[in-house]
Amino acid sequence: MRLARPLQLLIDQLQKLPSIGPKTAQRLALHILRLPREEARHLARAIVEVQEKVFPCSICGNLTDQDPCWICSNPGRAGDSLCIVEEASDIMSIERTGYNGKYYVLNRSFKLMDDIDPAEMDVESLSKILEQGQVQEVILALNPTIDGEVIARFLAAVINRHEVKVTRLAYGLPIGGDIEFADEITLRRALEGRKEF
């Protein structure tokens, strides 16, 4: 079936978004088409505005519309703890846990199979934060992949030069998961990280 050109263009653009397939893109496009004209304009303006006004914080790399970001400028945040994450979206997840420290965002995902060398990573701004002497612990909250493991080891070596404690998120079985279906690496990490009950 041939669609109106503007509708097909919108579907094609929506499919470029993560986890949006052809059917979801079509449903979203049809929903947008049914929106009142003013709501559609608000949506379009919000998309343009986020592109124009959101940028990485000059201190931590979190996405913000003010510099420094709301976390770095909050005196109530614990400055002795620094959590390193790959993407700013990871901050949203960690914030839900009640963590009250500061962050450092790498703002890129590393695919070592694509010949990306960890040494290319800009760690100068991280070193500047650590040289201030306030941070006592750095938490490596990187994705539990081979790439995340390599980056974590690289960062730990950089952080250890500043004589700061380095920890990482624990690995293990998810709540509600079945041991029967857990992979070998997850089970091994769960056994290694077991705690007294």
Image (cartoon, helix red, strand yellow):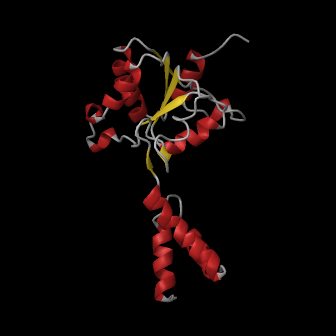
Q: Decide: is 86 above or below 195.
A: below
Which one is in front, 140 or 23?
140
Q: How many marks?
A: 0
Q: Identify whether 13 is placed above or below 124.
A: below
Which quadrant does the C terminus fall into? top right
Nearer the observer, 83 or 26? 83
Q: Residue at x 40, y 42 (%)?
A: 109
Q: Is residue 88 visible?
A: yes
Considering only vertical position in the picture, is 90 above or below 20? above
Left or right: 66, with 95 as reference point: left
- Residue lying at 42% horizontally and 35% vertically, measured from the top left: 59
Residue 64 rendering spot, x and y as whole percentages:
50, 47
Q: Position of residue 36 (x, y in %)?
A: 66, 81
Image coordinates of residue 178 in percent, x first then y, are: 69, 33
Q: Residue at x 54, y 22 (%)?
A: 189
| Occupied quadrant, residue 186 | top right
Percent of width and height locating residue 2: 49, 89
Q: Name the residue rendered at 50%, 18% in the picture.
A: 137
Q: Is residue 141 visible?
A: no
Toward the viewer: 196 or 47? Answer: 47
